[in-house]
Image (spheres, rainbow, N blue to C red):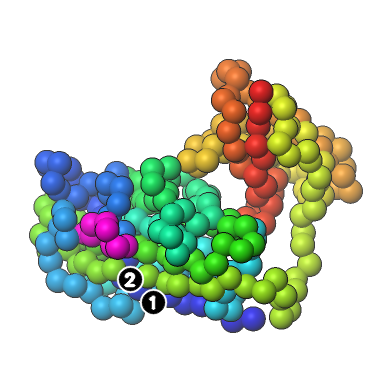
Amino acid sequence: MKNIFAHTCIYLLGLLVVSPAHGSSSGPPDAKTGRPGEGTCLDCHSGPVGSADSTTLLGFPGGAYEPESIYTLELSVRFSGQRRWGFELTAVNQAGTRAGQLIVLDSVATQYSNSGPGYLKQTSAGSRPGTPGPSVWTFGWRAPAPGSGPVKFYWCANAADNNGGTSGDVQCRDSLALAEGTGVEENPQPRRFHWYFPNPARNRVVIQYEGSPDLPVAVYSSDGSLVRTLTPSGTDELLRIVWDGRDRHGEPVPEAGYFVRLGDEVRSVVRVQLIR
């Protein structure tokens, strides 16, 4: 099964904030992906437009997505002479609303804004000042439910020169359309993780699963923030974690959907709905 490389130009930001109209190394404002009705990097930066082969998006098998599957995606950018990087990405359906769920896997380099359709973008550390390309960010995406139809990813980028201003930055944008898959895999791979848990869960979450007892379990909010780290009990054949619905400070968390990462790969991420 072949991977799709989306050759695109990504909105790479990475400049010191001088005024509200200037670029920000801590992440671009929402709605700068270049999708219809949104702004682009040109709202904050000036400079030449880069070629569409300067970036790649890797992680989709075939030309489609499988509903409710979880994908590990890698976004990379390279442009000779540039020394700071950033991006903003969103995924929408045909109606222009949120498609699936973007998942923060590296909270040091990436962050998530829950506004509108949801936006994934770089952090200040993720802009990697002073480093040449390529720059790569890894994140996850949970595909939407069956019947959601085609999905389109939009992103914009500015490959900055790290001079502290907003000029001399290489700017471009692109998009990637994916059809909804049939649910039949050409070469199905064995699943490493299998789990069981009631969903929604009232007041506490109990998950039984197969995996490694040496790997801690992490609970994240929908914006990618770490809520709690747990240690599983049991053996390799059947591990068990119990989350009491509290954060790492012992405070109860609100009713919401949370992501629980049971292992070291994105397929080990499950979503639970906590109710009170």
Q: Tell me the number on the disc at residue 44.
A: none
Question: How packed is label 1: few (under 14 Cα within 10 Å), some, or many (20 or more)?
Answer: some
- Residue 155 vs residue 139, the one in the foreground: 155
Residue 51: x %, y % from top left: 26, 78
Of callouts 2 and 1, the N-terminal one: 1
Residue at 27% of width from left, 49% of height from top? 28
User: Residue 17 or 65: which is nearer the viewer?
Assistant: 65
Do we see residue 131 in this rendering? no
- Callout 2: 10 Å neighbours few (<14), some, many (20+)? many
> Which residue is pictured at 78% across the width and 34% down the height?
206
Which mark is nearer the camera, 2 or 1? 2
Q: In this view, does 64 lie to the left or right of 264?
A: left
Q: For numbered disc 2, what is the local secondary structure?
A: strand
The residue indicated by pointer 1 is 7
**Residue range (magenta):** 34-41
Q: In the picture provided, is 247 more to the left or to the right than 93?
A: right
Residues at marks 2 and 1 touching, judged by CB atoms closer than 8 Å: yes
Specify the quadrant that holds the N terminus.
bottom right
- Three-letter amino acid code of the residue under disc 2: Asp
Where is residue 19 shown, x and y percent of the image?
Answer: 11, 41
Label count reads 2
Q: Mark 2 points at which residue?
A: 174
For the point 31% across and 59% down, the residue is 33
At numbered mark 1, what does the secondary structure look like: helix, strand or loop? Answer: loop
Residue type highlighted by circle 1: His
Q: In this view, does 47 lie above or below 213?
A: below
Locate residue 94, reporting x and y percent: 45, 64
212 part of magenta stretch: no
